[in-house]
Image: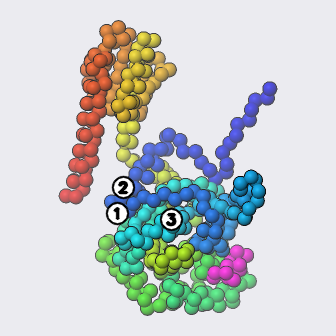
């Protein structure tokens, strides 16, 4: 029989292996700690939604919806295999659309304002994979509903800024711009349309289409020939109305007050349709895939999607790119917290049976345990316990098996004590509890030192 061929993963999709998980854990924990400290609550939304949701919010003409969505026709899956109405569903390419839907569908407009939500999970975009650009990637999306005050724009940007400082990512550039509101955008759109119409023959094919549907989009084109035309185009910021100007100036003043440095980026419009007024992007270096996060206001989206008129704003981070950056720059991240509290080590057949029983007992007491069955020497098993940062090892050798005892070894300093098997569960439970308490106290001390 021929040897079966292995099946490889799809292009643009990745395996995240244990050796990288501590980077992921650090990034995800840091993001979550920062947003929770800023009063955000987690709200998960489905990975699949009706395609219309994304078309109506992100925008049908955007690259994300127009070219990159994984869309399936589920009508064939209807009852009895009969084709009912054509139902197109898509894997989410981002979170904002789903969170807005959830906000409306769950009546969150009745909640006290602001409603501050975050979500973390996989998103999917069928773009050409490159370094930093994946077809399956993880976003952390942070959204605030119900506040139009520019103070909230500045506050949200400062949360983003703080997140990156906690993530130890340096040399960042925060680009910011205002793209106007429903009052001034039609005028700006016309200015763009008139200007780009005159240059139409020099634009790329996509931009010629954008010219008809949404000339704002051309500002975002990465083609060099279009970039050259964009360089001399009229700017949204020079043509926004007085109210938008006032709003933007206040955002900048608050940022100055908080010591958040920014870069005025008059050509920044962002690649999604729902934005108005403040838009921003944060990047680590020059280049196409350098954007680590971005966001802005979307004051009309909730109403546009069938909800009450509700000002809103948010941003999303690309966690894969953050992890890539941490790895590429060899950033030292804190040692992972012990996940395995107690590691079982044995020597000989009798000891093997005892350790298996004892580890099962400890697991039922909610103590996380590990075992190195298959490794012969005690030394190799101790090394394995060390690798997973276990607090303690329980060692049962041939002598202990005969005398009904076990050795508890503190993996921090190597100090050992021998206990009778009958007392083992109680003693280990006490020791683990004590160690977890110490860890909590250490965390508290670190926070206090920071406060001083
Ligand atoms: P976005 O700029 O499309 O915005 O994506 C946000 C971040 O997700 C990017 O800055 C990037 O780090 C990451 N990202 C996007 N595509 C990929 C990819 N193919 N591979 C790896 N990382 C990627 C949004 O999605 C908006 N929903 C942000 C927002 C939230 N605006 C308001 N609230």
Res 379 visible: no
The residue wearing badge 1 is 39
Q: Which dot marks residue 238?
A: none
Quadrant showing the N terminus: top right
Colour scheme of the picture: rainbow
Local secondary structure at mark 1: loop
What residue did someone put label 3 on?
102
Give whichever of discs 1 and 3 has the lower sequence position: 1
Q: Residue 406: percent from the left, percent from the top?
A: 32, 17
Kindly identify the residue that appears in the image at 38 percent across and 42 percent down: 336
Residues rendered magenta in the picture: 204-215
Which residue does the numbered mark 2 point to in the structure image? 33
> Within 10 angstroms of label 3, few (less than 14), some, or many (20 or more) residues?
some
Q: Position of residue 170 (x, y in %)?
A: 41, 60
* Residue contact between numbered discs 1 and 3, judged by CB atoms under 8 Å: no
Spatial CA span between label 3 and label 2 = 23 Å
């Amino acid at each position: 029989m021929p040897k079966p061929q292995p099946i490889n993963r799809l292009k643009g999709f990745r395996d995240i292996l244990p050796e990288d998980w501590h980077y992921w854990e650090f990034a995800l924990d840091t993001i979550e700690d920062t947003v929770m400290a800023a009063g955000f609550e987690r709200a998960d939304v489905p990975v699949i939604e009706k395609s219309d949701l994304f078309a109506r919010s992100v925008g049908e003409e955007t690259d994300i919806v127009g070219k990159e969505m994984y869309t399936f026709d589920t009508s064939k899956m209807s009852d009895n295999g009969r084709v009912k109405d054509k139902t197109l569903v898509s894997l989410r390419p981002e979170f904002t659309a789903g969170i807005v839907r959830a906000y409306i569908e769950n009546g969150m407009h009745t909640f006290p304002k602001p409603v501050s939500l975050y979500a973390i999970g996989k998103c999917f975009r069928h773009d050409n994979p490159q370094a930093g650009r994946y077809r399956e990637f993880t976003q952390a999306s942070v959204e605030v509903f119900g506040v139009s005050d520019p103070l909230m724009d500045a506050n949200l940007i400062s949360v983003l800024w703080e997140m990156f400082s906690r993530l130890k990512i340096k040399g960042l550039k925060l680009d910011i711009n205002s793209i106007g509101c429903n009052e001034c955008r039609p005028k700006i759109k016309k200015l763009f349309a008139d200007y780009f119409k005159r240059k139409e023959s020099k634009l790329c094919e996509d931009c010629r289409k954008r010219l008809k549907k949404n000339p704002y989009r051309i500002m975002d084109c990465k083609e060099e020939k279009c970039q050259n035309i964009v360089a001399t185009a009229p700017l949204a910021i020079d043509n926004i109305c007085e109210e938008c100007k006032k709003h933007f100036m206040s955002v900048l003043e608050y940022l100055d007050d908080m010591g958040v440095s920014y870069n005025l980026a008059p050509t920044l419009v962002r690649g999604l349709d729902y934005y108005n007024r403040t838009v921003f992007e944060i990047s680590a270096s020059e280049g196409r895939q350098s954007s680590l996060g971005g966001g802005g206001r979307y004051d009309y989206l909730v109403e546009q999607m069938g909800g009450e008129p509700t000002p809103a704003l948010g941003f999303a981070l690309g966690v894969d790119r953050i992890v890539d950056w941490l790895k590429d720059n060899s950033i030292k991240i804190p040692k992972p917290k012990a996940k395995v509290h107690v590691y079982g080590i044995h020597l000989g057949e009798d000891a093997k049976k005892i350790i298996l029983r004892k580890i099962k007992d400890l697991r039922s007491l909610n103590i996380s345990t590990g075992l190195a069955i298959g490794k012969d020497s005690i030394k190799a098993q101790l090394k394995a316990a060390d690798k997973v940062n276990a607090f303690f090892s329980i060692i049962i050798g041939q002598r202990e098996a005969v005398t009904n005892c076990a050795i508890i070894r503190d993996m921090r300093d190597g100090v050992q004590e021998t206990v009778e098997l009958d007392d083992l569960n109680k003693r280990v439970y006490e020791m683990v509890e004590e160690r977890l308490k110490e860890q909590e106290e250490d965390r508290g001390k670190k926070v206090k030192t920071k406060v001083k």
